[in-house]
């Protein structure tokens, strides 16, 4: 067996950071992720670079922030540039395979992999064009689907996840994997909606016993931009209490289903004799609000949306350990390079998660996320350090949360700055940390200018309103049927 470790990333979609047994959730059953955490390290302050699939995955691939690469939104997917960490590993002679969802532009692009197995990319190489229309947003009629899909049974997504899992098992068990070090990116879709859950997993939970959303029945937070997003993504309009309970049951069931798929992948790795020589990283691309504070899915900077689960295990990673230093999906690129003995990319913000796991808590490290996609009328920028979270909205009032005193982020302390020196100082520190990363007002202008150009490229606003309108990306099989057209 090679002394240099393999590198395995298992990524899910829309898995909120608290929905794991190892994160202390009293209901959700995730025995395989719990076991991974027991033999490794949980990063408790991990964040997505953007709470939306396409920009988050572009940042994960490049190891860089959205505002630096220009992958602002769901209609500007990664297309092979800037070079990804996959390019770097492949260029060094390592086999680098993806199995499952990528959400890049196309398999025709050189995204850096040696092979893409069952890849899911954005629809038509374009993606979700309606999200570009931030200055003149149309009604988003697909929002009703979220509640309409709630129930039991299989879906194209759960079928796809089973196919991904089987392909990953076969790839890992191939004796070729023992010949030289490899890297693999196994990307599951669950627990992403549709909230249709196989009965075996739905029945693990009782709708009558699920926890109520944070602030349930209390209305939206008092903030102009959050009202803009809730007006566009008006999912909550379709959820009465019973439907909400069934939706959370399905989400928890899909989370347990995803955990089982991840467990099968790890078991195949173990059966192949490679477990002890593989650095395993489990993450999700962003979270899901699941009704908290009146929001469903993502798009906002609350912990349930912008926070992500992150677990690492394997050679060089402490077992049974928790790390509170802020981390990001952009750290995956640095981790891949370090695990595979490549030089650091000095112009990128990431740091190897193995190094962070073995270092003391570092409050100087800032958690960061930004959002420039559908439903928003201005750019949102989140910075996190210590107990504080500061959300800067270009041209609008900020939010400031004390996550120790108010872990559910229900009290915006920014309103107290006039009379409270500690709050005034925290706001100033938040702005200082943000300016160290970017000038938010300049970034906001650049995002809108780029999106206007993209709208023109796609044929104007009307084309964006009518082309590729959907609530979740079709699976590869569904996209193939769309290309073939109706049978004659």
Image (cartoon, grey):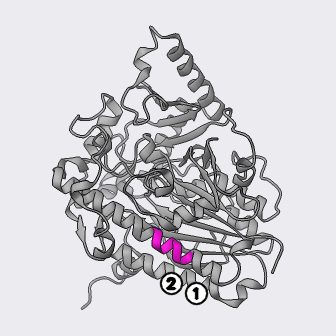
The boundaries of the magenta stretch are 259-265
Q: Is residue 455 magenta?
A: no
Labels in figure, total: 2
Secondary structure found at label 2: helix
Q: Is residue 63 visible?
A: no
State whether residue 87 is above or below residue 238: below
Residue 153: percent from the left, percent from the top? 26, 76
Secondary structure found at label 1: helix
Of residues 404 and 229, the one nearer the viewer is 404
Task: Identify the residue shown where x is 37% and y is 26%.
Answer: 411
Q: Is residue 383 visible?
A: yes
Residue 42: percent from the left, percent from the top? 60, 52
State whether residue 433 is above or below residue 77: above
- In space, the residues marked 2 and 1 are separated at their CA atoms by 6 Å
User: As drawn, is 198 to the left or to the right of 78?
Assistant: left
Label 1 belongs to which residue?
170
Which image quarter: residue 269?
bottom right
Which image quarter: residue 219?
top left
Quadrant into which the N terminus falls: bottom right
Residue 314: percent from the left, percent from the top? 70, 65
Of residues 150 and 76, the one nearer the viewer is 150
User: As drawn, is 239 to the left or to the right of 233?
Assistant: left
Categorize mark 2 by other alpha carbons within 10 Å: few (<14), some (14-19), many (20+).
some
Quadrant into which the C terminus falls: bottom left
Task: Identify the residue shown where x is 44% and y is 53%.
Answer: 16
- Check if mark 2's residue and mark 1's residue have beta carbons within 8 Å: yes
Of residues 297 and 403, the one nearer the viewer is 403
Residue 463: percent from the left, percent from the top? 32, 58
User: As drawn, is 124 to the left or to the right of 264?
Assistant: left
User: As drawn, is 183 to the left or to the right of 48?
Assistant: right
Label 2 belongs to which residue?
166
Task: Identify the residue shown where x is 61% and y is 34%.
Answer: 438
């Amino acid at each position: 067996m090679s002394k240099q470790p393999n590198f395995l990333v298992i990524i899910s979609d829309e898995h909120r950071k608290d929905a794991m047994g190892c994160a202390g959730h009293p209901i959700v059953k995730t025995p395989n992720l719990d076991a991974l955490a027991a033999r490794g390290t949980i990063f408790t302050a991990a964040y997505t670079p953007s709470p939306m699939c396409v920009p988050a995955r572009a940042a994960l691939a490049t190891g860089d922030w959205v505002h630096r690469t220009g992958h602002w939104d769901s209609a500007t997917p990664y297309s092979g540039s800037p070079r990804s960490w996959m390019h770097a590993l492949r260029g060094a002679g390592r086999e680098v395979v993806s199995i499952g969802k990528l959400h890049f532009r196309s398999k025709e692009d050189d995204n850096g992999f040696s092979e893409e197995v069952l890849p899911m990319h954005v629809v038509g190489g374009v993606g979700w064009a309606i999200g570009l229309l931030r200055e003149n947003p149309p009604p988003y009629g697909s929002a009703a689907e979220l509640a309409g899909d709630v129930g039991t049974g299989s879906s194209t997504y759960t079928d796809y996840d089973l196919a991904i899992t089987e392909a990953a098992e076969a790839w890992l068990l191939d004796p070729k994997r023992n010949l030289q070090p490899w890297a693999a990116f196994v990307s599951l879709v669950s627990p992403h909606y549709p909230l249709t859950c196989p009965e075996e997993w739905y029945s693990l939970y009782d709708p009558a016993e699920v926890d109520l959303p944070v602030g349930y029945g209390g209305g939206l937070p008092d903030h102009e931009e959050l009202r803009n997003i809730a007006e566009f993504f008006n999912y909550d309009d379709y959820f009465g209490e019973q439907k909400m309970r069934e939706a959370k049951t399905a989400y928890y069931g899909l989370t347990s289903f995803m955990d089982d798929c991840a467990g099968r992948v790890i078991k195949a790795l173990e059966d192949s004799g490679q477990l002890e020589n593989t650095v395993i990283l489990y993450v999700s691309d962003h979270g899901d609000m699941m009704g908290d504070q009146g929001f469903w899915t993502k798009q906002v900077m609350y912990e349930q949306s912008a926070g992500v689960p992150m677990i690492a295990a394997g050679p060089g990673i402490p077992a049974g350990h928790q790390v509170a230093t802020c981390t990001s999906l952009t750290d995956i690129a640095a981790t891949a390079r370090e695990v595979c003995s490549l030089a650091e990319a000095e112009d990128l913000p990431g740091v190897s998660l193995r190094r962070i796991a073995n270092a003391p808590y570092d409050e100087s490290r800032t958690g960061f996320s930004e959002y420039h996609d559908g439903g928003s009328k201005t750019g949102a920028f989140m910075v996190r350090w210590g107990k504080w979270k500061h959300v800067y909205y270009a041209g609008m009032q900020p939010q400031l949360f004390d996550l120790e005193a108010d872990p559910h982020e229900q009290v915006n302390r920014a309103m107290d700055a006039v009379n409270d020196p500690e709050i005034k100082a925290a706001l100033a520190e938040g702005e200082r940390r943000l300016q160290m990363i970017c000038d938010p007002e300049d970034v906001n202008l650049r995002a809108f200018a780029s999106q206007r150009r993209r709208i023109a490229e796609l044929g104007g606003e009307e084309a964006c309103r009518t082309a590729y309108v959907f609530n979740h990306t079709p699976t590869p099989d569904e996209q193939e049927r769309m290309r073939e057209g109706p049978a004659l």
